[in-house]
Image (cartoon, rainbow, N blue to C red):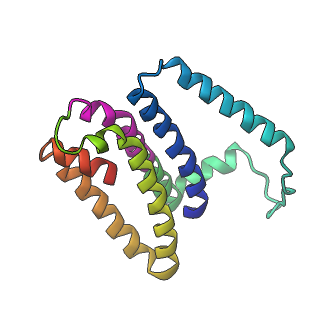
Amino acid sequence: MNIVEVFFGVRAIIGPFLVSYFLTKDVDWKWLYVVAATLCVVLIIMALFAKYPETKKSSEEQINIKRTLKMVKDRYALGFSLGAFLYVSIEAAIYVWMPTLIADYDGNFLFIVTYALPIFFVLRAGGRFLGAWMMANFDWTVVLTISSFAILLCYAFSFINETATVVLLPLS
């Protein structure tokens, strides 16, 4: 899962980098949408010509809404889903809210402010590679606990002052 997520991370690096670059060059915001639309057309064309593997059914059990709702009773499936929901919510809050929070910063780390989103996504993708390696070589519960605690510390200490916020939120 971590390795697959890295490829999504690459996409997440390019978008914020373009936004940051356009902002530093005072490019009209409409050009961002031109670039995004062009990339979408390229991806559609690539998808049309891609060869997809055949789907192999691993079970004869029918997939339907009733079967899906039965999984809600499984505390492990519910816990996993809740964890994934919270993770995505926090991640989205960081990349949506962080640029506004640090926009008025005028300290020694202006480079980080300018490229906070690309830095966040580069570190996120790198963390996925590191996470995949760590999960293969260490007990996953220990890796998850230490990683979650480190992220919590980044969030908690980011409120000390503006410089801490500028450094720790992208690091999170």
The quarter in which the N terminus is drawn is bottom right
Residue occupying image coordinates x 26% and y 31% = 103
Q: Is residue 129 magenta?
A: no
Part of the protein shown in magenta: 86-104
Q: Quadrant of residue 11?
A: top right
* Residue 157 shown left or right of residue 63 in the figure: left
Name the outermost residue toward the left: 160
Residue at the image position 83 percent from the left and 48 percent from the top: 50
* Picture quadrant where residue 39 is located: top right
Image coordinates of residue 69 in percent, x first then y, are 61, 47
**Is residue 94 placed above or below 100 in the rendered structure?**
below
Identify the residue at the far front of this view. 25
Q: Is residue 108 left or right of residue 150?
A: left
In front of the other: 82 or 87: 87
Please name whichever residue, 114 or 161, is drawn nearer the observer in this view of the structure.
Answer: 114
Task: Give me the residue at 84% from left, 52% from top.
Answer: 52
Q: Main secondary structure of the magenta part?
A: helix
Does any portion of residue 69 appear in the rendered image?
A: yes
The residue lying at 54 percent from left, 62 percent from top is 2
Residue 86 in sight here: no
User: In front here: 71 or 124?
Assistant: 124
Up-down relation of residue 48 to residue 73 (above or below) = above
Measured as percent of width and height from the top left, residue 84 is found at 47, 52
Residue 57, horizontal then vertical, whole percent: 83, 60
Taking 136 as reference, is 50 left or right? right
Q: Position of residue 149 (x, y in %)?
A: 28, 63
